[in-house]
Image: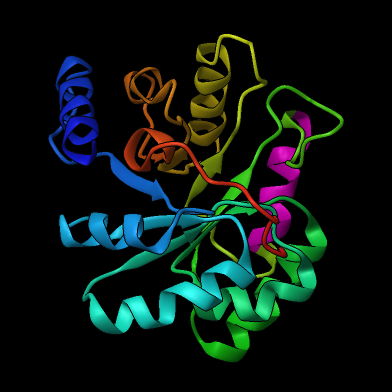
């Protein structure tokens, strides 16, 4: 299934007139059995996405020791009290969504002399139950992040379920361009080709690679 997704990404890049390899595939390994993750690692893939700090901490240090060149991205909500552990575990955080978290990450970055790549999550559908900066507040939020010496690499969104994702992807791309940001983390298993056609630099694909998740007791965040 990994090869099929990579072929579809390559075809979508070509159809959009984009350079081969310009889109990073984040294989979403949250709540997946370890043998499935190891199988994808053995197939040569190295970029993975996790939703839970605790699950990532139990899984990835050992896998990083065994497989060279692994990059792990945080794609789920990040509690401020887990930020220190997160910056040690993750190469990128796609869910910067509030000033308290930005302030915590800035302090940690200053102390460590390094910071994961950061994407600001934008709530493009203004859904009350969903995390993310509202579009009208984004420019000010980015200005405040930069005042803290944080340099977000891009934006991330999760369009409302059941809606056409294209207007949300288009809006996110416009917001990124307006703010001089190159990164666009958008598109999942059902819509990543649309996202690529509208400028995605990172697509987050899970079940289409690994198969359906086997949910039991949810891991602690």
- The residue range painted magenta reads 136-146
Most extreme residue toward the top, as rendered?
Answer: 164
Residue depicted at 24% across the width and 61% down the height: 41
* Residue 45 visible to the viewer: yes
Q: Is residue 125 above or below residue 6?
A: above
Q: Residue 23 at x, y = what percent?
A: 27, 39
> Main SS type for the magenta part?
helix
Q: Residue 96 at x, y = what percent?
A: 66, 54
Residue depicted at 38% across the width and 32% down the height: 200
In magenta stretch: residue 108: no
Q: Residue 154 at x, y = what percent?
A: 49, 46
Locate residue 194 relative to residue 83 in the image: left or right. left
Residue depicted at 62% across the width and 68% down the height: 53
Q: Quadrant of the C terminus?
A: bottom right
Q: How is the image coloured?
A: rainbow
Q: Quadrant of the N terminus?
A: top left
Most extreme residue toward the right, as rendered?
Answer: 128
Q: Nearer the viewer, residue 53 or 132?
A: 53
In magenta stretch: residue 142: yes
Q: Is residue 51 above or below residue 60?
A: above
Locate residue 219 relative to residue 197 in the image: left or right. right
Most extreme residue toward the bottom, as rendered?
Answer: 111
Q: Quadrant of residue 155?
A: top right
Locate residue 47 relative to residue 149 in the image: left or right. left
């Amino acid at each position: 299934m990994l090869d099929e997704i990579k072929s579809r990404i390559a075809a979508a890049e070509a159809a959009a007139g984009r350079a081969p390899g310009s889109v990073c595939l984040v294989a979403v390994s949250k709540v997946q059995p370890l043998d499935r993750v190891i199988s994808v690692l053995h197939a040569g893939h190295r970029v993975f996405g996790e939703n839970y700090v605790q699950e990532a901490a139990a899984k990835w240090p050992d896998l990083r020791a065994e497989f060279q060149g692994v990059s792990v991205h945080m794609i789920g909500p990040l509690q401020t009290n887990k930020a220190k552990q997160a910056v040690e575990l993750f190469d990128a955080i796609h869910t910067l969504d509030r000033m308290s978290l930005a302030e915590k990450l800035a302090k940690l970055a200053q102390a460590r002399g390094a910071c994961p790549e950061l994407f600001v999550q934008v709530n493009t559908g203004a859904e009350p139950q969903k995390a993310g900066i509202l579009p009208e507040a984004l420019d000010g939020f980015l200005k405040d992040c930069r005042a803290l010496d944080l340099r977000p690499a891009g934006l991330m969104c999760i369009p409302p379920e059941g809606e056409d994702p294209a207007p949300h992807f288009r809006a996110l791309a416009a917001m990124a361009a307006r703010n001089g940001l190159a990164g666009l983390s958008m598109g999942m298993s059902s819509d990543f080709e649309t996202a690529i056609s509208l400028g995605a630099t990172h697509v987050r694909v899970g079940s289409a690679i690994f198969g359906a998740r086997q949910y039991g007791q949810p891991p602690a965040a």
